[in-house]
Image (spheres, grey):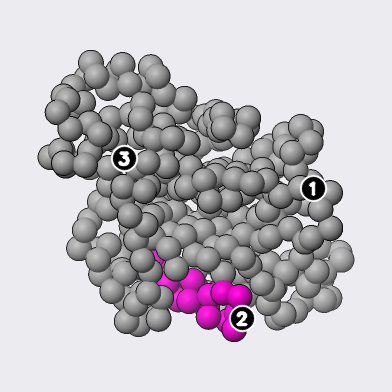
Amino acid sequence: MTRRATKRVKEEQMSKPDDIDSGSDASTNEDKSQSYEKAVNLPAHQTKHLPELVYHFPCIDTSFRLTQRNDTNSTGSSLWLSPQVLSSFLIHTYGKVQQKDSSAARKRVLELGSGTGLLSLLMARLGWDAVATDIPPVLESVLKPNVEAGLYQLVNEGKAEKDQIRVCQLDWTVLPERWHWHPELGFPSTQKHVDADTRNTQTTTEQHFDLILTADTIYEPSLIRPLLFTIAHLYQRQAESKPTILLALERRDPTQVNEAFRLASEDYDLPFKQIPAKRVRKIFDTLGDGAAWSRDDWDGVEIWKL
């Protein structure tokens, strides 16, 4: 989702008893340099200046080349920490790749505010049908190019089918009754589908999703209610077999984050529960770069589930 350009302010935090870095001076430049030398990927705040970034997932033998932009006046056009941490959680939770020759229908995931498209690409690699959504200028400048390049790569490597990711515009400020659902593929958009096959067959039939993802989308106060309304609609419209919802964020402003989850619970009937921080750390240490980074680099990242 397009975001107002903001400076990322990092606050030094005191070591916690259960922090594996306790007792060491992990915040020194020397230690950080050493830990980055062992890292497969750098933390996002170290790579935002790069116009192109290669992101590696060694545990599933996959890398994606991502375009980043710093000329769009949008922070959604570069990678952030919360998708990095959430990606390891997704591999841990859904890492058993669905077989392409399986007779069972592929599971479906919808990502809200996809940005660079990393998470949707990862889910396609894990065998899911993914719908990546955002709005201009992110949609055209980074999301579509990254998904097209990444999916082409996966197809050529025999790791995905050519129809496993769809990209569309989904504006949270547009009410669901004004969404357009693709008549055949069953994904929502706030932009009409005008290709030859669908020009005269618009439909409001809403399809099922098994998983809804969103990362680093709790940042702008004016967008919190539209985001929650969108999530609530997608979640509550499915009377049976509710989708799992995973929301990852950086706790930059504790007051804002607390208020967002209060609104989610009280106003939108979305009682999110936080994944225990120890569990998130263990997973990111094992399947991501947590053990190779300073704990201060990502200690404020949280994952919430519904």
Residue 81 visible in the current orientation: no
What predominant SS class does the magenta segment belong to?
helix
Circle 1 Cα neighbour tier, 10 Å, few/some/many (<14 / 14–19 / ≥20):
some
The span shown in magenta is 223-242
Q: Amino acid at mark 2?
A: Glu
Between 171 and 278, which is closer to the camera in this rendering? 278
- Disc 2 secondary structure class: loop
Inter-mark Cα distance, 3 to 1: 35 Å
- Disc 1 secondary structure class: loop
Q: Amino acid at mark 3?
A: Trp
Q: Earlier in the sequence, mark 2 or mark 1?
A: 1
Circle 2 Cα neighbour tier, 10 Å, few/some/many (<14 / 14–19 / ≥20):
few
Position of 11 relative to 37 (above/below): below
Q: Position of residue 256 (x, y in %)?
A: 24, 63
Left or right side of 133 for 227: left
Say which residue label 2 marks. 240
Say which residue label 1 marks. 100
State the quadrant of the C terminus: bottom left
Q: Amino acid at mark 1?
A: Lys
- Disc 3 secondary structure class: loop
Inter-mark Cα distance, 2 to 1: 26 Å
Residue visible at 53% across and 51% down?
A: 93
Say which residue label 3 marks. 298
Residue visible at 31% across and 69% down?
A: 261
Labels 3, 1: front one: 1
Inter-mark Cα distance, 2 to 3: 36 Å
Q: Position of residue 194 (x, y in %)?
A: 77, 66
